[in-house]
Image (cartoon, rainbow, N blue to C red):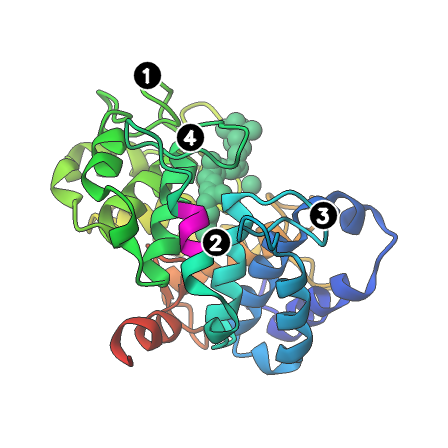
Amino acid sequence: MGELAVEKHTEYILSIEKRKDDFESLVMEHLRLSGAYWGLTALDLMHKIGSVKPDDVVTWIMSCQDKESGGFGGNVGHDPHVLYTLSAVQVLAILDRLDALDVEKVSDYVAGLQNEDGSFSGDMWGEIDTRFSYVAICCLSLLHRLRKINVEKAVDFIVSCKNLDGGFGCIPGGESHAGQIFCCVGALAITGSLHHIDRDLLGWWLCERQCKDGGLNGRPEKLTDVCYSWWVLSSLIIIDRVHWIDKDKLSKFILNCQDLEKGGISDRPDNAVDVFHTYFGVAGLSLMEYPGLKTIDPAYALPVDVVNRIFFQK
Ligand code: GRG
Ligand code: ZN
């Protein structure tokens, strides 16, 4: 198991950019902008962001923008979607290059996705999900443009997706799932609306996600997976119940999912690594204050120094 293999993971993340023809690059093609966010945030948490050339990244990101709507697609020429628009904003924030954006144009695109009931669609096709509520709220907050939406209605919609078990689903009546819980708790934290949460009830549901192997699952009876270290732990930190998890066992589970030869972290021990789980493994360890890592903000999913630069150094 050993320690976090920072050098190996750095090499692995940097190598993804160069490999254009293997399986992971192929499946990543349509969501490359989110892949850039996962990879670059992991590098920054490991103090390795200096190994990329910011100008090249900024040029590529800006080429993913749909100039008409202002939204960003997953890659050059792809349709705009709120998910990739947040990834673009997050990566530019990490590189301290938010000045590359036409903030009014981008925030108008995001605000334009709000529906009458306060919910958000992901793009022009209209699918509604609390993921998109979080993404829109996080993005507009980072751009200092929350005033462009009806925050009260946005919060009402999220609260309407709360279940009797204390968790949240993707739409009203949808089953509680740790990923959706992160989105709803994160959005409520950003908008100062955490009073809508029963912390003990939700904290109980979340800490029950820890299984015998030390890892966390996303809902009852499911398999453990490294990415839930992020979705579950960030929510527990926001509601101040993280001490209900055995951090030592969880850290060991994550470290045990490392590929110590080629670098990268997988979803569970001995599976193939990918950049998504590499990021969430490192981010989970950061939430548990693993030595040598930057601290990550549990609501904005960005290093705390980046968030502080945006909100306290204007
Ligand atoms: C900035 C961190 C950040 C996120 C942006 C995209 C997004 C907002 C949030 C996604 C939240 C979510 C729904 C995460 C869950 C992802 C996941 C592992 C889904 C798998 O679901 P199932 O049902 O797997 O296939 P289980 O584990 O339940 O068997
Ligand atoms: Zn996963």
Image location (x, y in percent) of residue 215 = 46, 43
The range drawn in magenta is 106-110
- Is label 1 or label 2 in front? 2
Q: Amino acid at mark 1?
A: Gly
136 in the magenta segment: no
Q: Amino acid at mark 2?
A: Leu
Residue picked out by circle 2: 86
Q: N-terminal of the two: label 1 or label 2?
A: 2
Helix, strand or loop status at disc 1: loop
Instruction: Give the CA distance from mark 1 to mark 4.
Output: 12 Å
Helix, strand or loop status at disc 3: helix
Instruction: Give the CA distance from mark 4 to mark 2.
Output: 15 Å
> Is residue 124 visible to us here?
yes
Q: Quadrant of residue 278?
A: bottom right
Q: N-terminal of the two: label 1 or label 4?
A: 4
Q: Nearer the viewer, residue 108 or 185?
A: 108
Label placed on residue 173: 1
Q: Quadrant of residue 4?
A: bottom right
Circle count: 4
